[in-house]
Structure formats: C-alpha cells, structure tokens
Amino acid sequence: MKGKRSTTEDKIRILREAARGEKSLADICREANLSVVSFHRWQRPFGQMDLHEARRLKELERENNELKQMLAESLLKNRVLEAVCEKKL
C-alpha cells in the first residue's frame, strides 16, 4: 500500500520544526505520521532548502519536463517528414 504523499513545502516545514529542537525527532515523526527513516531520507535533498527555493525547484522541473516533451514532439515530426520525403523520391 502506498503511503501519504507529502508536498515539498510539507517536507521542509517538518524539517524546520525538527531543526528548532523544541520536540524530539520521534514526536515530530509521530505527529506527521512519518517514519524516522523517511525523515532522514528527506534531509538530504531538502535539509538546507527554503520554501522559495523549493518552489523554484518545482517550477524548473516542470519547465524542464515541458521542454523535453516539446523536443520529443519536434524530433518525431522531423522523422515523419523525413520518411515521407524518402517515399516520394
């Protein structure tokens, strides 16, 4: 069964709460319904990241995916046109 999908903002919020040191790591993970292993897994990519950086990263990833899709469509059109031109000759 798949677990709950947390947003990047949620992950950073939980990491910041743990960094404050007001509560123990076990308490924070229990409140967030999260395992300690997942918490440490989140620390690598999001440990030093701010919310605006996370939003910018998400925006760049979305833009990158759009550009990849545009390139794939362009290459496909190019191959189709080449195939049509070869058949006509």
Image: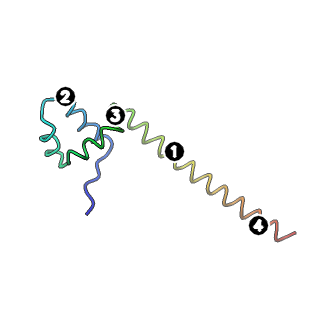
Mark 2 belongs to which amino acid? Arg
Q: CA separation, marks 4 and 3?
A: 48 Å
Q: Secondary structure at mark 3?
A: helix
Rendered view: 5 above or below 80: above
Mark 1 belongs to which amino acid? Glu
Residue that appears at 14% across and 44% down: 31
Rendered view: 87 above or below 76: below
Say whether disc 4 or disc 2 marks the residue closer to the N-terminus: 2
Q: Nearer the viewer, mark 1 or mark 4?
A: 4
Mark 4 belongs to which amino acid? Ala
Q: Which mark is residue 51?
A: 3
- CB under 8 Å between callouts 4 and 2? no
Residue that appears at 26% across and 46% down: 38
Say whether disc 1 or disc 2 marks the residue closer to the N-terminus: 2
Say whether disc 4 or disc 3 marks the residue closer to the N-terminus: 3
Q: Nearer the viewer, mark 1 or mark 2?
A: 2
Relative image position of residue 48 (x, y in whole percent): 33, 30
Q: Secondary structure at mark 2?
A: helix
Q: CA separation, marks 1 and 2?
A: 34 Å
